[in-house]
């Protein structure tokens, strides 16, 4: 079973995907990964959902809200960024926007006059560095290979830097069993106390929310949907009761249950 994730080879997504299966194929964007899984072209995909420094990956949130997929597992992996180049004499640093942000303090301190370029993935930036001596990339130190040198290691702003990935599957594989669940709620409403009502549905049943995030619906200015992760399985009566209450609150909108799942830690 092939796993589709963000490429090219050597991305942190690639490292997370290998925990699922060694047969990994690549796409250039998160939205493309979610699209091919939703269309049943692949049975599994791995996408980044949240980083401990930069927060949620909005491209993933928005694509998940639009797609009909399942979340079957989550993978947590530490992120070790290194500055990779052919020599210390480079003029530009290319990497994924998240990686550049996660190393912001280091880059501002050590390379305040060096241009920064956001590219599709950390591995794409490393590819540029291999092809062009004037470019440095940011990636795992193992990606240096024979051509690049590790100019500096562990350049991320926080030593505890880690990223959470979702393992996704076609909609038919949504499962109520697991220790965590993810739902997307579109209330199609806006009134004082709306968010409080959504939160109370979980709090009254002693369900911990591990993440809640609002994203624009795209329908009109000021209209939002909510991504909610909570520490309970969809099979649990308390979760079912909470979501029934959410459904009544979002009677003019919708609620999408992406499934329940467990957590896996992957160390490299």
Image: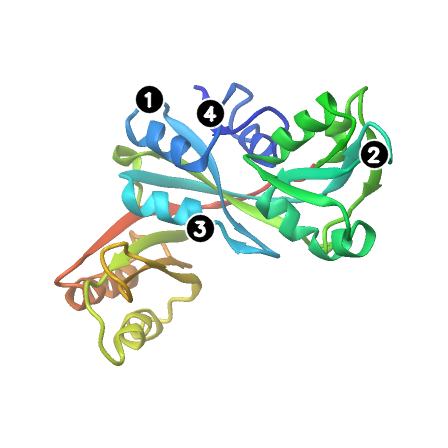
| Residue most extreme to the left | 252
Q: Earlier in the sequence, mark 2 or mark 1?
A: 1
Cβ atoms at labels 4 and 2 below 8 Å apart? no
Comparing labels 2 and 1, the label whose residue is closer to the camera: 2
In this rendered view, identify the residue nearer to me: 244 or 163: 163
Q: Residues within 10 Å of mark 3 (few under 14, many from 20)?
A: some
Please name the residue shown 27% across and 80% down the image: 193
**Res. 158 image quadrant:** bottom right
SS for dot 3: helix
| Colouring | rainbow
The answer to whether marks 1 and 3 mark residues whose Cβ atoms lie closer than 8 Å is no
Return the disc, 1 or 3, that comes first in the chain's sequence: 1
Upstream in the sequence, badge 4 or badge 3? Answer: 4
Nearer the N terminus, badge 4 or badge 2?
4
Position of residue 48 measured from the top left corner of the image (x, y, whole percent): 50, 42
Give me the residue at 65% from left, 47% from top: 100
Q: Quadrant of the N terminus?
A: top left
Mark 2 and mark 1: span between their CA atoms?
A: 38 Å
Q: Residue 150 got which mark?
A: 2
In the drawing, what numbered circle is on residue 41? 1
What secondary structure is marked by label 1? loop
- Residue 119 seen: yes
Instruction: Please name whichever residue, 211 or 130, is drawn nearer the observer in this view of the structure.
Output: 130
The image quadrant of residue 99 is top right
Q: Which residue is mark 4?
A: 3
Q: CA distance from mark 1 to mark 3?
A: 24 Å
**Which image quarter: residue 227?**
bottom left
Q: Quadrant of the C terminus?
A: top right
Picture disc at residue 58: 3
């Amino acid at each position: 079973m092939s796993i589709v994730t963000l490429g090219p080879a050597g991305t942190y997504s690639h490292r997370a995907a290998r925990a699922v299966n060694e047969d990994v194929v690549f796409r250039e964007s998160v939205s493309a990964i979610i699209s091919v899984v939703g269309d049943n072209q692949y049975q599994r995909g791995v996408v980044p959902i949240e980083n401990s420094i930069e927060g949620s990956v909005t491209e993933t949130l928005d694509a998940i809200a639009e797609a009909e997929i399942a979340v079957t597992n989550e993978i947590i992996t530490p992120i070790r960024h290194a500055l990779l180049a052919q020599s210390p004499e480079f003029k530009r640093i290319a990497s994924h926007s998240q990686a550049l942000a996660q190393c912001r303090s280091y880059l501002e301190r050590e390379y305040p006059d060096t241009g920064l370029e956001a590219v599709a993935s950390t591995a794409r930036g490393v590819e540029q560095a291999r092809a062009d001596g004037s470019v440095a990339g940011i990636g795992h130190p193992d990606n240096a290979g024979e051509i690049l040198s590790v100019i500096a290691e562990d350049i991320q702003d926080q030593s505890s830097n880690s990223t959470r990935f979702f393992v996704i599957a076609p909609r038919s594989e949504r499962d109520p069993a697991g220790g965590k669940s993810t739902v997307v709620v579109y209330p199609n409403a806006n009134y004082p106390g709306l968010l409080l009502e959504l939160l109370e549905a979980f709090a009254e049943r002693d369900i911990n929310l591990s993440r809640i995030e609002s994203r624009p619906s795209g329908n009109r200015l000021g209209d939002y949907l909510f991504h909610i992760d909570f520490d309970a399985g969809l099979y649990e009566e308390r979760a079912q009761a909470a979501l029934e209450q959410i459904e009544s609150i979002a009677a003019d909108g919708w609620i999408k249950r992406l499934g329940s799942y467990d957590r896996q830690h992957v160390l490299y």
